[in-house]
Image (cartoon, grey):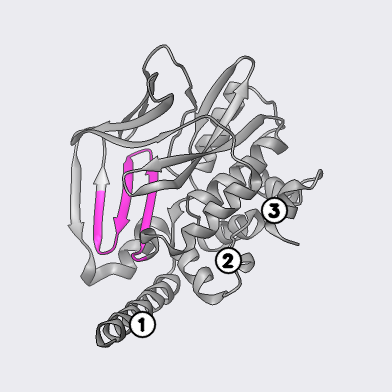
Amino acid sequence: MRLTDRLMTSESPHSEAVSLFQGHFGLDRPRPDLDYLRQILRHYARIPYENISKIIKVAKNPDPEAKFRLPRELMEDHIDHRLGGTCFSLTYFLEQILVGSGYSCHKAMAHMQAGENIHCVMVVELSKDQYLVDPGYLLWEPLLLSTEGLQISYTPRGGVELAYDPIGGLFHLFTFDIGGRKWRYRFSDRAVSDGEFRGHWIASFSKPTMHNILLNQLTEKGQLYIRGNHLRLTSAAEEKKANIRQDYHRQIQEFFGIEPRWVEEALSILKRQRREWGQQRQGQGLG
């Protein structure tokens, strides 16, 4: 069954994964209100943003349909190996959790400096209000989508601002910390179809974020971020940076709990891909 077919079935094929999430984090019986939404997001934030599992799965499966990391696999890999996912798999799984908990919500695409439609978010409807929910960007709190004023949320790493641009009709998300204020992405609250979401997900299998190992997680002490050999720890009070090249596998295991074998497999794939890309460029130059 294709992913689009699974998305459109009346009975969710991911109910077991949702139950697994609720049981693992000890969530009580669902009550679809704002407080319960906050509980879900706090627990969901314990699943890290990481592309190690995606690098490995994409490389092993030439068929696009086999590259998707769907909710059951994502949740089991987190329980067994402390793995997580990237924005598409995290958003898709969160949608299943929210729908299974009685919320009305939909997926929306976001645009970043690196390109259009390369990030995705959730919009949750509660009473007459709509809220931004973004597991890929580590939002602990739902942010009210308001066209009338700036919305601010504070996290252990600093804060998040959500502003509406009436000229463009888009919302803009900024983060701020000890290093300053930065624009992150813009988005419309328009719902994307399952087919459109699937297309953008497939496109993400070859994006620049797949060229380096990337891990990101928000904890009570601040944000942990690893890109390539660089580690950054950011809190509201300070920012620490380190090059972890000499102790790479151990540092990832220490901070994220991911075993060295996963890291090594992903690094081997990236090394092979870089070699193949280099050979292709040489061949094009000779032509």
Magenta segment main secondary structure: strand
Residue located beneath label 3 in the image: 4
Q: Is residue 216 magenta?
A: yes
Q: Position of residue 178 (x, y in %)?
A: 19, 33
Residue located beneath label 2 in the image: 67
The C terminus lies in quadrant: bottom left
* Amino acid at the residue labelled 2: Lys
Instruction: Inspect this view and state whether residue 106 appears.
Output: yes
Q: Nearer the viewer, mark 1 or mark 2?
A: 1
Query: Left of 156 or right of it: where is 122?
Result: right
Residue stretch rendered in magenta on the structure: 211-232
Label 3 with label 1: CB-CB less than 8 Å? no
Q: Is residue 254 above or below residue 26?
A: below
Q: Position of residue 116 (x, y in %)?
A: 41, 46
* Amino acid at the residue labelled 3: Thr
Q: Of callouts 1 and 2, which one flags the residue occurring earlier in the amino acid sequence? A: 2
Q: Which mark is residue 276?
A: 1
Q: Which mark is residue 149?
A: none
How many angstroms separate mark 1 from mark 2 (CA)? 20 Å
How many angstroms separate mark 2 from mark 3 (CA)? 14 Å
Residue drawn at x 75%, y 54% is: 5
Query: Left of 147 or right of it: where is 190?
Result: right
Q: Position of residue 16 (x, y in %)?
A: 74, 51
Q: Of callouts 2 and 3, which one flags the residue occurring earlier in the amino acid sequence? A: 3
Q: Residues within 10 Å of mark 1 (few under 14, many from 20)?
A: few
Secondary-structure class at tag 1: helix
Q: Is residue 114 above or below residue 141?
A: below
Q: Is residue 247 above or below residue 280?
A: above
Secondary-structure class at tag 3: helix
